[in-house]
Image: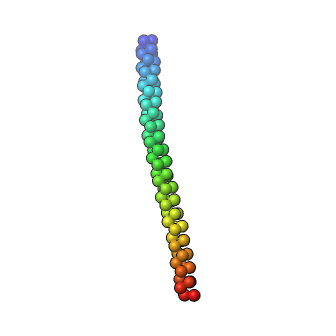
């Protein structure tokens, strides 16, 4: 009977240790996930900024090309 009680105590201790380890791992995963999320948000913001700069350049170039075309038409008219 004492062996059964000792086995139950050992099993309970083992389960308690596994729960503690699992909780610790979950906390570490959450921290890692939050860091990854911050990095993704940062990179998306940088990408949006780069796209905006590119779009502004395209708009300026289109306007410049139109001015050049207009100047060429005036010159050859």
Colour approach in the figure: rainbow
- For this orientation, the residue located farthest to the top is 1
Q: Position of residue 5 (x, y in %)?
A: 45, 14
Residue 28: name its quadrant: top left
Examine the rendering and report whether any part of residue 15 can be seen: yes
Q: Residue at x 43, y 21 (%)?
A: 13
54 to 22, vertically: above or below? below
Foreground of the two, 44 or 27: 44
The residue depicted at 49 percent of the width and 56 percent of the height is 49
Looking at the picture, does residue 61 appear above or below residue 17?
Answer: below
Q: What residue do we see at 56% from left, 79% from top? A: 70
Q: How many numbered discs?
A: 0
Q: Position of residue 9 (x, y in %)?
A: 44, 17
Question: What quarter of the picture does the N terminus occupy?
Answer: top left
Q: Nearer the viewer, residue 36 or 63?
A: 63
Point out residue 24 in the picture as x, y percentages from the top left corner: 43, 31
Q: Quadrant of residue 8?
A: top left
Q: In this view, which residue lies farthest toward the bottom? A: 77
Picture coordinates of residue 53 (x, y %)? Answer: 49, 60
Query: Is residue 11 something one can see in this rendering?
Result: no
């Amino acid at each position: 009977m004492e062996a059964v009680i000792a086995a139950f105590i050992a099993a309970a201790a083992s389960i308690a240790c596994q729960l503690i380890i699992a909780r610790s791992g979950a906390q570490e995963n959450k921290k890692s996930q939050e860091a990854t999320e911050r990095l993704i948000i940062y990179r998306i913001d940088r990408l949006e900024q780069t796209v905006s700069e590119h779009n502004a350049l395209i708009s300026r170039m289109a306007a410049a090309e139109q001015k050049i075309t207009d100047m060429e038409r005036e010159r050859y008219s």
